[in-house]
Image (tube, rainbow, N blue to C red):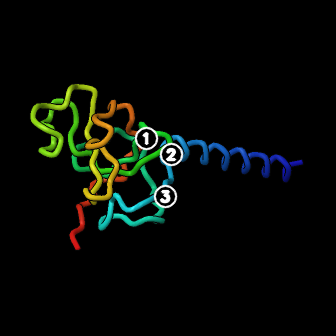
Amino acid sequence: MRYVMGIALGVAGTVAALVWLRRRFVAVTVVGVSMEPTLHAGQRLLARRAAGATGDVVVVRNPGADPSLLVKRLAACGGEPLPAVLGDGLVPEGWIAVLGDNPHRSMDSRHFGLLPASSVVAVIGSVPPRVE
């Protein structure tokens, strides 16, 4: 009986740990070339569920259909100046601008506009753009 209880407690602890991890982290796979040369298609990333700051690489909900999540660089947050490629002015509070590191091959705020700040699902972190 103790053996069965020990296994049950071990399974319950493992399940609780997995639920905790799932609520705080998300695993994503980079699709496409929009973040090259910083990130490459097929790379697996572990992102922390958080809001992010300007310059961070983030996971956002795609305002289009497929794929459902996008990996982009957070170019500007509410109250900050719009990136030059998006025009003049400030990003409205509650909104963000995202850009890919490969501007000629990226579907980003230049195409679909600003996103609600709530679109950020997770933060990969402060990954400096790589130049090749």
| x and y percentages locating residue 115 in the rendered image | 32, 34
Q: Residues within 10 Å of mark 1 (few under 14, many from 20)?
A: some
Look at mark 2 in the image and give the residue it sits on: 66
Q: Could you tell me which residue is drawn at 30 percent across and 42 percent down?
A: 111
Please give the label number shown on residue 15.
none
Q: Amino acid at mark 2?
A: Asp
* Contact check, label 2 and label 3, Cβ < 8 Å: no
Q: Residue furthest top?
A: 93
Q: Is residue 129 above or below residue 66?
A: below
* Contact check, label 2 and label 1, Cβ < 8 Å: yes
Q: Quadrant of residue 34?
A: bottom left
Q: Residue furthest right?
A: 1
Helix or strand or loop: what does disc 2 sit on?
Answer: loop
Q: Is residue 1 left or right of residue 83?
A: right
Q: Quadrant of residue 32?
A: bottom left
| x and y percentages locating residue 75 in the rendered image | 22, 45
Helix or strand or loop: what does disc 1 sit on?
Answer: loop
Q: Is residue 21 above or below residue 115?
A: below
Look at mark 3 in the image and give the residue it sits on: 29
Look at mark 1 in the image and give the residue it sits on: 62
Q: Is residue 32 left or right of residue 96?
A: right
Q: Is residue 87 left or right of residue 55?
A: left
* Contact check, label 3 and label 1, Cβ < 8 Å: no
Q: Amino acid at mark 1?
A: Asn
